[in-house]
Image (tube, rainbow, N blue to C red):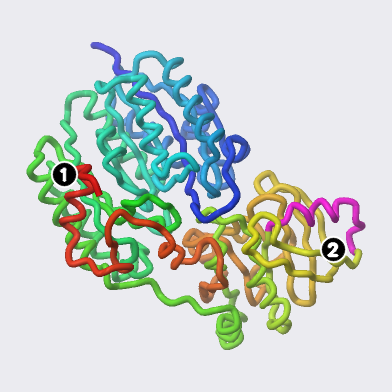
C-alpha cells in the first residue's frame, strides 16, 4: 500500500482596500504563526488551534476528517499556519514573505499527493488584487498539476478564473456570523482524502454573478438567505453531490470582476455539477433586490438607544460603528461616533474603543488617576478627524492582541485606547478592564457580524451606525469594474457576464 502524503497549510487575512495602512508580515507572525510539530500540536483534540478565538478551526477540522476517512496509508504533513487580523492591503514585502514561506515549506515537505489550503478568499495586496491565486501559482509551480488541492474559504471569498483553475476541491463557510470553521475544514478534508484513496472523483462547477450587493443582511438564519442555505442541504442528499458553497461579496476588496459566486462539487458527473451550479446561481440572483438596511447616523442612533429603556435595564445596546469595522480591515481610529457619544449622549453610560498608539505613548508615564487632555484619531487615516478630550486616566494595562491599553473616563463615557487594532467583538474586551457590559447603556463593537454571537447574553438591541469611513457599504461605488454590476448599474441577467468571467474573455 503506497503512502499518500497530505500537507496542511494556512495563509489567511480579510483585507480592506480602502485602508491606508498596509499589512506587514509581522502582523501575521504576531497574530498567529505555527509550523511543523507546533502546528500539529495545536490541531490535536487536546490543542487550541487559534488561542483566544477558536479551539477548532479549519485545519483541525480537516485533520479530523483525514483521520476518520483515511487509513494507514495517509501521512499528514503540517506545513505552517499564518493568520493575521483584518487589515489593509498586503505590502510588497508581506506578499513576498508569505510566498517565500509557502515555497520553502513545500520544498522542505518533500513530495505531496494532496494539500489542504485554508484561506480567507478576500485578501488584497498592493501588487495584486488576487493574492490567493498568486499563492496557488506557487503551489502549482512547486508541486505540479498532479497534486490534489483542497481549499477552505470564508463565504465572503472572491472567486476568479485564475484561482478556480488551480484548485480541485473547495468548501466554504455556510454560516454568517461564522460558526462553522471546523466543519468547513472537515468538509474539505473529507473530500480530499476520499479523492486520494480513489473513493470519489471530485468535479467542480462554478458560477460568478455581476452582483455586489443583495441578500438583505446576508445572515444565514434570516429569511432572505436561509432558503438558499437549506437548498444547499437538500441538493447534497444526492449521493453524487459532495458539497455546495455560496459566496457573498467582501465589499472592501477591489477585484474588477468582483461579485457573488457559487461552487458545487459532484462525484464524477460534470453535467450534474454544471446544472446545480446554474440552479444555485439563479437562486442568488433572485435575492439581488433585497438590499442591506439603511444605517442611521449617530444622532438618530443615540435617540434609538434612549428609547430602548427596558432593553437597557435588561442588558445593553450593541452599537456597531459600521464605518470603522476593524473586522473588515479598517484601522480602528474613527472618532466620529466617539465624539457623538461624548458630546451628545452624556446621560448614557457608553464604552467606546479607539486605536491610538500615539496617545498610549504620550500617557506611558502619566500617573493613573490623573486628569489628562489628549488628541485622539487622525494618525493612521487622514480621513479620520482629530477629537480632543479631557478626562481621567482610569487604567493602564497590556494585552497580547491589542498591545498597550489605557482607559480614559469622560463623564459617563469610558474610552478604551489600544496600541494596535481594536477588533472588539467579545464582552471580555471590556470586562477584563473592569467595565461591566451589563451596566453599560451602549457598548461599541468593531466587528460586522461575530459580536452577535459573543454578546448574545447581554445584547438587547443591535444598531449599526454610519459615520463615514473605510467600511461604509457605499465605498463599493468607488471601485472600478470590468462590466456593469448590480445594483450599481442596470444588469438584465447574470449569465452573459458569468460566461465572460469564467471563459477568461477580454473586457
Q: Nearer the viewer, residue 499 or 208?
A: 499
Residue drawn where x is 63% and y is 52% of the image:
421
Is 471 situated above or below 130?
below
Furthest toward the bottom, the residue is 307
Check residue 241 in the rendering and tell me which mark sits there, or answer none: 1
Looking at the image, tell me whether mark 2 or mark 1 is earlier in sequence order. Answer: 1
Secondary structure of the residue carrying numbered label 1: strand
Q: Crowdedness of circle 2 by 10 Å Cα count: few (<14), some, many (20+)? A: many
Where residue 256 appears, as percent x and y from the top left, is 35, 51
Q: Residues within 10 Å of mark 1 (few under 14, many from 20)?
A: many
Q: Is residue 295 above or below residue 321?
A: below
Q: In the image, what residue occupies the spot 40% across and 32% down?
A: 135
Within the magenta stretch, is there residue 359?
yes
Span shown in magenta: 355-369
Q: Disc 2 to disc 1, how far (Cα)?
A: 59 Å
Q: Residue 95, how many percent across, how many down?
A: 50, 34
Give the residue number, with chain letter if any, for mark 2: 393
Apparent side of residue 30 relative to residue 56 in the rendered image (left or right): right
Relative to 208, 401 lies left or right:
right
Dot 2: what SS? strand
Q: Count all numbered tags in the image, as a single digit.
A: 2
Q: Residue sitting at 41 percent across and 52 percent down?
A: 254
x, y percent for residue 409: 79, 69
Residue 210 is one of the magenta-drawn residues: no
In this rendered view, identify the residue nearer to me: 496 or 105: 496
Residue 376: image quadrant is: bottom right
The label nearer to you, 2 versus 1, is 2
Amino acid at each position: 500500500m503506497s503512502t499518500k502524503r497530505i500537507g496542511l497549510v494556512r495563509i489567511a487575512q480579510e483585507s480592506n482596500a480602502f485602508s491606508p495602512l498596509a499589512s506587514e508580515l509581522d502582523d501575521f507572525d504576531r497574530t498567529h504563526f505555527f509550523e511543523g510539530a507546533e502546528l500539529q500540536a495545536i490541531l490535536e483534540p487536546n490543542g487550541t488551534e487559534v488561542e483566544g478565538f477558536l479551539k477548532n478551526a479549519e485545519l483541525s477540522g480537516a485533520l479530523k476528517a483525514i483521520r476518520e476517512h483515511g487509513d494507514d496509508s495517509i501521512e499528514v504533513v503540517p506545513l505552517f499556519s499564518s493568520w493575521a487580523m483584518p487589515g489593509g492591503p498586503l505590502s510588497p514585502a508581506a506578499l513576498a514573505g508569505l510566498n517565500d514561506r509557502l515555497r520553502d515549506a513545500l520544498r522542505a515537505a518533500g513530495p505531496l499527493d494532496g494539500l489542504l489550503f485554508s484561506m480567507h478568499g478576500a485578501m488584497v495586496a498592493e501588487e495584486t488584487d488576487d493574492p490567493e491565486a498568486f499563492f496557488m501559482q506557487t503551489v502549482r509551480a512547486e508541486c505540479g498539476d498532479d497534486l490534489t488541492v483542497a481549499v477552505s474559504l470564508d463565504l465572503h471569498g472572491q472567486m476568479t478564473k485564475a484561482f478556480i483553475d488551480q484548485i480541485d476541491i473547495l468548501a466554504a463557510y455556510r454560516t454568517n456570523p461564522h460558526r462553522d470553521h471546523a466543519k468547513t475544514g472537515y468538509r474539505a478534508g473529507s473530500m480530499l482524502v476520499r479523492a486520494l484513496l480513489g473513493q470519489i472523483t471530485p468535479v467542480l462547477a462554478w458560477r460568478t454573478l455581476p452582483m455586489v450587493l443583495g441578500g438583505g443582511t446576508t445572515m444565514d438564519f434570516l429569511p432572505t438567505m436561509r432558503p438558499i442555505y437549506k437548498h444547499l442541504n437538500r441538493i447534497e442528499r444526492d449521493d453524487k453531490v459532495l458539497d455546495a458553497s455560496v459566496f457573498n461579496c467582501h465589499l472592501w476588496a477591489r477585484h474588477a470582476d468582483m461579485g457573488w459566486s457559487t461552487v458545487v462539487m459532484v462525484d464524477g458527473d460534470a453535467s450534474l455539477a454544471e446544472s446545480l451550479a446554474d440552479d444555485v446561481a439563479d437562486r442568488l440572483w433572485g435575492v439581488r433586490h433585497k438590499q442591506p438596511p439603511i444605517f442611521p447616523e449617530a444622532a438618530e442612533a443615540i435617540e434609538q438607544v434612549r428609547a430602548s429603556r427596558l432593553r437597557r435595564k435588561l442588558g445593553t445596546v450593541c452599537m456597531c460603528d459600521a464605518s470603522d469595522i476593524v473586522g473588515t480591515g479598517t484601522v480602528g481610529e474613527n472618532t466620529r461616533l466617539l465624539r457623538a457619544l461624548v458630546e451628545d449622549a452624556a446621560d448614557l453610560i457608553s464604552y467606546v474603543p479607539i486605536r491610538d498608539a500615539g496617545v498610549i505613548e504620550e500617557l506611558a508615564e502619566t500617573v493613573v488617576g490623573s486628569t489628562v487632555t489628549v488628541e485622539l484619531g487622525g494618525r493612521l487615516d487622514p480621513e479620520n478627524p482629530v477629537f480632543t478630550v479631557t478626562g481621567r486616566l482610569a487604567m493602564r494595562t497590556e494585552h497580547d492582541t491589542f498591545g498597550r491599553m489605557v482607559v480614559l473616563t469622560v463623564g459617563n463615557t469610558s474610552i478604551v485606547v489600544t496600541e494596535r487594532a481594536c477588533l472588539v467583538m467579545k464582552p471580555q474586551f471590556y470586562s477584563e478592564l473592569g467595565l461591566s457590559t451589563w451596566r453599560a447603556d451602549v457598548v461599541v463593537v468593531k466587528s460586522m457580524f461575530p459580536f452577535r454571537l459573543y454578546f448574545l447574553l447581554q445584547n438587547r438591541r443591535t444598531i449599526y451606525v454610519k459615520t463615514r469611513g473605510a467600511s461604509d457599504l457605499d465605498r463599493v461605488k468607488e471601485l472600478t469594474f470590468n462590466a456593469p454590476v448590480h445594483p450599481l448599474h442596470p444588469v438584465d441577467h447574470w449569465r452573459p457576464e458569468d460566461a465572460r468571467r469564467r471563459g477568461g474573455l477580454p473586457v
